[in-house]
Amino acid sequence: MSDIILAVILIVAILAIAYYLIKKMAVLVVNAVLGLILLFILNFLQVMQWVGRPDIGYSLATLIICGVGGLPGVLVLVLLNIFGITV
């Protein structure tokens, strides 16, 4: 009887952890997609040229920063580009 109770508790714990991770992953995926979309919009509208700088290129490092960092990653790239540091 105690084996069944232990198995049920273990299954409930695994499901709770999986639910928590999926919930957090959804937020990270949405943030990454929004970051990549914002990078595309910035380059499409040539926003960086408004401040006298060239557009942010689509290099592997730039895409990784936008994918992992999301919206704050794009903000970091814009600030670095304004200060003349290219990635």
Image (cartoon, rainbow, N blue to C red):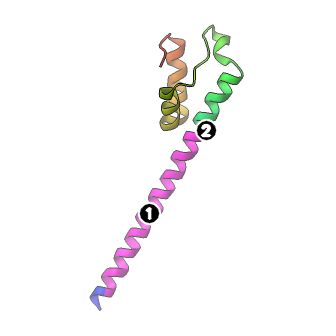
> Of the residues under marks 2 and 1, which one precedes in the sequence?
1
Q: Residue at x 34, y 75 (%)?
A: 10
Q: Position of residue 2 (x, y in %)?
A: 27, 88
**Circle on res. 34:** 2
Q: Position of residue 25 (x, y in %)?
A: 49, 51
Q: Contact, CB < 8 Å: mark 2 with mark 1? A: no
Q: Distance between the residues labelled 2 and 1?
A: 24 Å
| Residue 7 location, quadrant | bottom left
Few, some or many residues within 10 Å of mark 1 (<14, 14–19, 20+): few
State the extent of the magenta-drawn residues as a range: 4-33
The local secondary structure at tag 2 comes to: helix
Give the residue furthest to the top: 52
Q: Quadrant of the N terminus?
A: bottom left
Few, some or many residues within 10 Å of mark 2 (<14, 14–19, 20+): some
In the depicted structure, whether residue 7 falls above or below residue 61: below
In the depicted structure, whether residue 76 falls above or below residue 66: above
Q: Residue at x 48, y 52 (%)?
A: 24
Q: Which amino acid does label 1 sit on?
A: Ala
- Residue nearest the observer in this picture, 67 or 50: 67
| Residue 21 location, quadrant | bottom left
The local secondary structure at tag 1 comes to: helix
- Residue nearest the observer in this picture, 34 or 58: 58
Q: Where is residue 4 in the image (x, y as percent from the top left)?
A: 33, 87
Q: Where is residue 85 in the image (x, y as percent from the top left)?
A: 47, 13
Q: Mark 1 points at which residue?
A: 18
Q: In this view, does 52 lie to the left or right of 9?
A: right
Query: Magenta-highlighted stretch: main secondary structure?
Result: helix
In magenta segment, residue 65:
no
Q: What residue type is labelled 2?
A: Leu
In magenta segment, residue 22:
yes
